[in-house]
Amino acid sequence: DTEVTQTPKHLVMGMTNKKSLKCEQHMGHRAMYWYKQKAKKPPELMFVYSYEKLSINESVPSRFSPECPNSSLLNLHLHALQPEDSALYLCASSHHTGNSPLHFGNGTRLTVT
Amino acid sequence: DAKTTQPNSMESNEEEPVHLPCNHSTISGTDYIHWYRQLPSQGPEYVIHGLTSNVNNRMASLAIAEDRKSSTLILHRATLRDAAVYYCILRTSGSRLTFGEGTQLTVNP
């Protein structure tokens, strides 16, 4: 079990669908992150939120739209995805964006058909 | 970001110590050395981090060379549950946590 909860665990969506991934933590962390991980590869950073404001966008295509409605929640809205976007999407949180360790969820396995 | 070099894979036997090496010859003075691991079908898990001195916690020990150009993660008694990909990452305070390829550790019963 982790203290970062991601839902759903698995998601299959068509290229014309709109869906959202959700992430929740109740550790009082003020930094939250989205990473993408392809099979047998290391995680790649997508977005960083610090105090509910987007601080880093790693040139992610606009079909991925992050949202941080409050300090405990992080969403990733998806639309018009491509099959190559199929991956494990990992959420993480940390006390702040300094050197504090990141706590990861177990991810959402996304398949785009 | 400064780069780290790790072996692609290592093997160990259960209940024996494991030393996982990491080279980081271009480390800067403000880079902390972080270790994370990722068990199968799970998200990465923080293991330990340090700057200059050796560090110990309940999971592992981190030995840092005097010139800081290399470090070693030490698992004192490997268990089957320690089989994972271990990532050595350099991180300056406030910077991105950027993963390299890591070392796949296999633990033999």
Image (spheres, rainbow, N blue to C red):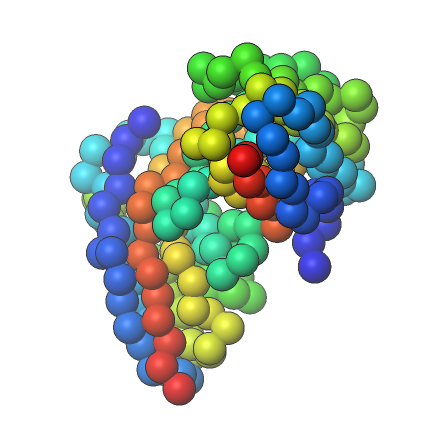
Q: Is residue B25 above or below residue B16?
A: above
Quadrant location of the N terminus of chain A? bottom right
x 58%, y 19%: residue? A80
Could you tell whether A73 is left or right of A106 in the image?
A: right
Q: Quadrant of residue B105?
A: bottom left
Observer able to see residue B84: yes
Q: Residue at x 37, y 50 (%)?
A: A40
Name the one closer to the observer, B51 or B15: B15
Query: Which quadrant of the figure has residue A93?
Result: top right
Image coordinates for residue A96, horizontal then vertical, percent: 63, 29
Q: Is residue B103 left or right of residue A25?
A: left
Vertical position of residue B105 compared to residue B80: above or below: above
**Residue A5: image location, x then y, percent:** 73, 46
| Residue at point 71%, 29% (across, down) | A20
- Please identify the quarter of the rendering in which residue A29 is found: top right
Q: How many marks?
A: 0
| Residue at left offset 54%, top offset 58% | B41
Can see residue B53? no
Q: Is residue B90 left or right of residue A51?
A: left
Q: Is residue B74 left or right of residue B6?
A: right
